[in-house]
Amino acid sequence: MKHHMRLHHVDLPVADVAAVRAFFETHCGLRCVFAGAGGPTVLAGDGDFAVALSPLGNGEAERWPTGFHVGFNLPSEPALRAAFARLAAAGVPIARPLGDLGGAPAFQCLAPGGLVVELVCRR
C-alpha cells in the first residue's frame, strides 16, 4: 500500500537566524509564523510549506554542500526579471546571472551565510 505524504517543511541550520529571516521576508515574500527564543524560527509563504531556521550548534561552521539551494518558482518571466532587478539593486550578491537553467529562465543569488537561493519561472 502506498502512503501519500506531503512535504511540510525543511529546517535550515544557519549562523544568523535574524539575517536569513530578514532576507526571506524582504526578498522572497515569506512571513514569520513562529519565532522561538533561541530556537527555531518558522517562515511560511503561500500554501502549506514552511522553512524553519535553526541556530547552528556551538562551534559548528555554516557550510552548504555544492549544489544545495533553496528554490522559488515565480509565476511569469516578467516577474522573474523584476525580481532579478530588485535583488541586484538591493546589493544582494548574484551567484548565477539571469539565463537558461535546465530549460527555464532562472538566476541564483546568495542569502546571508552563503545560502544559494534560486528563482526560476517554470511554466
Image (cartoon, grey):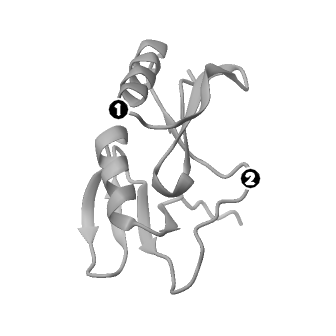
Residue drawn where x is 74% and y is 53% of the image: 66
- On-image quarter of the N terminus: bottom right
Q: Position of residue 38 (x, y in %)?
A: 32, 82
Residue drawn where x is 56% and y is 21% of the image: 123
Amino acid found under the numbered disc labelled 1? Ala
Q: Position of residue 104 (x, y in %)?
A: 64, 21
Secondary structure type for disc 1: loop
**Rendering quarter of residue 37:** bottom left
**23, above or below 103, in the image:** below
Q: Work out which residue is located at the far bottom of the displayed protein and give it.
A: 58
Q: Residues within 10 Å of mark 1 (few under 14, many from 20)?
A: few
Q: Quote the CA–CA distance across marks 2 and 1.
A: 25 Å
Indicate which disc residue 102 carries.
none
Q: Which residue is mark 2?
A: 66
Q: Which residue is mark 1?
A: 90
Pick whichever of labels 2 and 1 is earlier in the sequence.
2
Q: Residues within 10 Å of mark 2 (few under 14, many from 20)?
A: few
